[in-house]
Amino acid sequence: METENYFSDMTRGSSALVLHERDNVGVALSDLKAGDSVTVIEGGGAKYDFTVSEDIAFGHKFALRALPPESRVYKYGEEIGRMSSGVDAGGWIHVHNMYCDRGMK
């Protein structure tokens, strides 16, 4: 896929980015409202439609599948934290329901 087309597709409509195949979160590339259908674009260029269940601000994370409490959260292919409370697929993930003690031990 040509780089120019890859990035121009991200700016059309509501979209989100999955940075690594191991990730279980998407990153909103625009402000999203609950019920919005977004085009999720994976690192390799694959795309699929996904519906968010909560308002998600630009740059924030949302769950690509249900994540129960203590689930590991992966972004960039790395564990970035754990869920302090569960979230359904499409739910907002931020400091209110995720914690990270990495580097604090």
Image: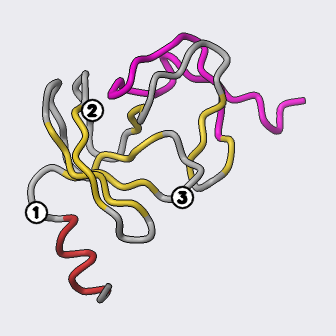
Q: How many circles with numbers are drawn on the protein? A: 3
Quarter occupied by the C terminus: top right
Q: Position of residue 6 (x, y in %)?
A: 27, 77
* Residue 40 belongs to the span the image colors magenta: no
What span is in magenta? 80-105
Residue 63 position by quadrant: top left
Q: Residue 50, percent across and down?
A: 25, 40
Badge 3 amino acid:
His
Separation (CA) of disc 1 from disc 3: 21 Å
Looking at the image, which is closer to me, 56 or 71? 71
Q: Earlier in the sequence, mark 1 or mark 2?
A: 1
Tell me the element at label 2: loop
Label annotation for residue 90: none
Against 54, residue 21 (above or below) is below
Q: Is residue 31 above or below residue 92?
A: below
User: Disc 1 designates what residue?
Assistant: 12
Residue holding disc 2? 56
